[in-house]
Image (cartoon, grey):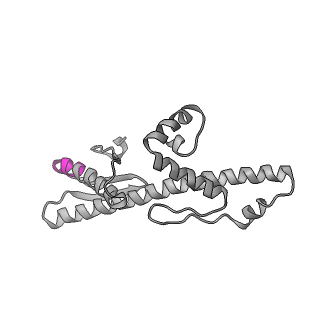
Amino acid sequence: MLGAMYGATTGESGRLVPQLARTYPRALATVERAARAGEAGEVVSSHLGRGCPEPPAAWRRAQLTATAEEQRRADAAARSRGRFTRNFIVQSTAAEWALCWLAEVRRRLRASAASGTFIGELVFFLHDEVVLHVRRDQADAACALVAEAAADATRLMFGRIPVEFPVSIACVDSYADAK
C-alpha cells in the first residue's frame, strides 16, 4: 500500500492503485499533486504547513536544456524531485501526527500522575514508536492510554474522519521483546 501511495505503478503496488483511487481518491490526488508540483520545481507543504526545501539552483539550471540528452537528464531530475515531494507530504504529515500522539500520551501520563493514579512514564519515542515504563498492574491502563491518545491525535490533526490510525501495542518485560 505504501508503494502505491508513493507512486509505484508496477508489481503488487501498481495493482493496488485503482483500488486506492476508488477508496481514497482525495489522498491519492493529494500525493499526485505533490509529485507534479515537485516535478515543476514547486514547494509543497505538510498538513500542518511545514514546507519542503526549494530545489537547488543547480536543479533549476539543469531544467533549462538545449539538447535531447540534457532534456533526458532534466526529466529524470524532475521525476526524482516529484518522488521527493510526494514522500515529503506523506512523511512530514505522518511525523506531525506522531508528535501530536506523543504530546497526548505525555499529557495523559501527567494527568494520571497529578490525579494520584500514576500509570507510568515515557522512556522512548522515535518516529512512530512510543515506549512507556509501567508497573505490571497498570499495563491495561497504559494500553488504553496509548490507543486513546492515537485517536485524539487523529481528531486533532484531521477532525472527525472515517479513517483509523491503528497502533500496535505490546506489553513486554524488555524492549528487546517488543515486536
Residue 139: say if magenta.
yes
Expressed as whole percent of the image width and height from the top left, the position of residue 102 reads: 34, 59
Q: Residue furthest right?
A: 67
Q: Is residue 166 above or below residue 74?
A: above
The residue depicted at 49 percent of the width and 61 percent of the height is: 46
Image quadrant containing the C terminus: top left
Q: Residue furthest left?
A: 116
Side (left or right) of 79 relative to 100: right
User: Which secondary structure is most common in the magenta stretch?
Assistant: helix
The residue depicted at 23 percent of the width and 65 percent of the height is: 110
| Image: magenta residue range | 135-143
Side (left or right) of 149 relative to 18: left
Q: Answer yes or no: is residue 138 visible.
A: yes
Q: Answer yes or no: is residue 132 visible.
A: no
Q: Quadrant of residue 43?
A: bottom right
The residue depicted at 80 percent of the width and 52 percent of the height is: 71
Expressed as whole percent of the image width and height from the top left, the position of residue 89 reads: 51, 56
Expressed as whole percent of the image width and height from the top left, the position of residue 130 reads: 35, 53
Residue 90: say if magenta.
no
